[in-house]
Image (cartoon, rainbow, N blue to C red):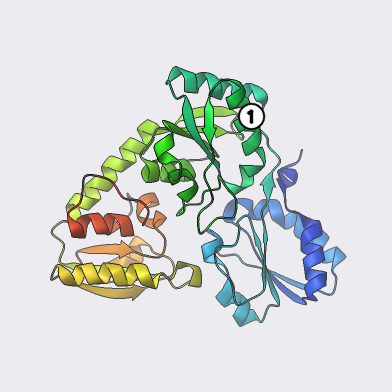
Amino acid sequence: MSKEEYYDFNLELIVKEILRRKAKKVLVQVPDGLKHLFLPHLEELKSRLSNVDFIVSGDPAYGGCFLAEAEAKMLRADLIVHIGHTEYYRSEVPSIYIEAFSKTIASEGLIEELTSYLKDIHAKKVGLCAVLQHLNMIHKVKTILEENGIKVFIGKHGPYTRYNGQIVGCDYVSALSINDDVEAHVIISGGLFHPLGLGLATLRPIVKIDPYENKITDMSSYIQKILKKRYWEIMRSLDAEKFGIIVGFRKGQFRPKIISNIEEIIREKKKTSVRIVMDIVTEERLANLGNFFDAYIITSCPRIPIDNIVKFKKPVLTPGEAHMVLTGKLEKYRFPW
């Protein structure tokens, strides 16, 4: 199988929807990790739809929240084809979401290895979740685990996801909904990003089954290491008086209720804040603001503070961490909101 065939980009659906909508100018948005795998398929789309003008967004596509809606309006595109995520919010620009399920499926042997490990750590009841690309194997994993005497819970999807058991970087509702029923969570995923968020949200042991590396990994020690770092950022923020509240420019990352709630608590504590509109947050951009602010609160994406932890010189908090700092309720870590 060539690299271009690792994912199902559902070209037939893309062609069908473009024809049905009579779109003449299409903006294609793909996550960075999938761009090089999707682009060869774009040639097929262009050959099948020779009268359609395809434009590719070269910017990041961090999630469905980061939809290239403003770019599509500027380009007067008829349609956005967004690859790799489910719908996060209703766009003003017609959009279709191509889920790009992975064709790499964990073997029964790997799932049996997972079963043995869960028994070794005495996890008899587990939550099971997956990132979108691997939801196509969630029931296979559930079936084999339960055949081996492990009770499996799959939670109902949250507000920013479409499928039961699905998680994204800021929505762990499916796992949290069954968190009290389980002793650990199993996630079908590659990398560190999603297992880390799951661990911070649930505060349970996290075991990852990775179809790409064909490997089982207990993520708990890594998550605890990051959790300690997050508490250090929280402690550094306790004496902060001036907060910069980062407001997302993207429609999917503009969260007025969260902003208002945080501002209200800041006023009650006799502290001050300023809203700062920022699309992509970097240390260089924050440094341009000088020393006016003591700490920043990111309301656009709660993963920015977590995944850039070593790059920010001043404390940069998630909304959940900001609530901990401002209310003094530090006992239980709060993530993401």
Instruction: Say if residue 144 shows up in the picture.
Output: yes
Image quarter in which the N terminus is found: top right
Q: Is residue 262 above or below residue 200?
A: below
* Number of residues whose C-alpha sits closer than 10 Å to that of mark 1, classed few (under 14), some (14–19) or many (20 or more): few
Horizontal side of 270 relative to 34 (left or right) equals left
Q: Indicate the position of residue 13 as horizontal and vertical percent values.
A: 78, 60
Q: Nearer the viewer, residue 217 or 267?
A: 267
Q: Which residue is mark 1?
A: 143
Q: Nearer the viewer, residue 302 or 49?
A: 302
- Residue 104 sits in quarter: top right
For image coordinates 41% across by 54% down, the residue present is 303
Q: Is residue 188 above or below residue 318?
A: above
- Residue 121 sits in quarter: top left
For image coordinates 52% across by 48% down, the residue present is 167
Horizontal side of 307 relative to 19 (left or right) equals left
Q: Indicate the position of residue 184 as horizontal and vertical percent values.
A: 43, 32
Total numbered circles: 1
Horizontal side of 82 relative to 156 (left or right) equals right
Image quarter in which the C terminus is found: bottom left
For image coordinates 45% across by 17% down, the residue present is 120
Q: Indicate the position of residue 61 as horizontal and vertical percent values.
A: 56, 61
Judged from the image, the secondary structure of the residue bearing numbered disc 1 is: helix
Q: Amino acid at mark 1?
A: Thr
For image coordinates 49% across by 68% down, the residue present is 252
Q: Is residue 278 above or below residue 331?
A: below
Q: Nearer the viewer, residue 29 or 152?
A: 152
Q: Indicate the position of residue 128 as horizontal and vertical percent values.
A: 53, 37
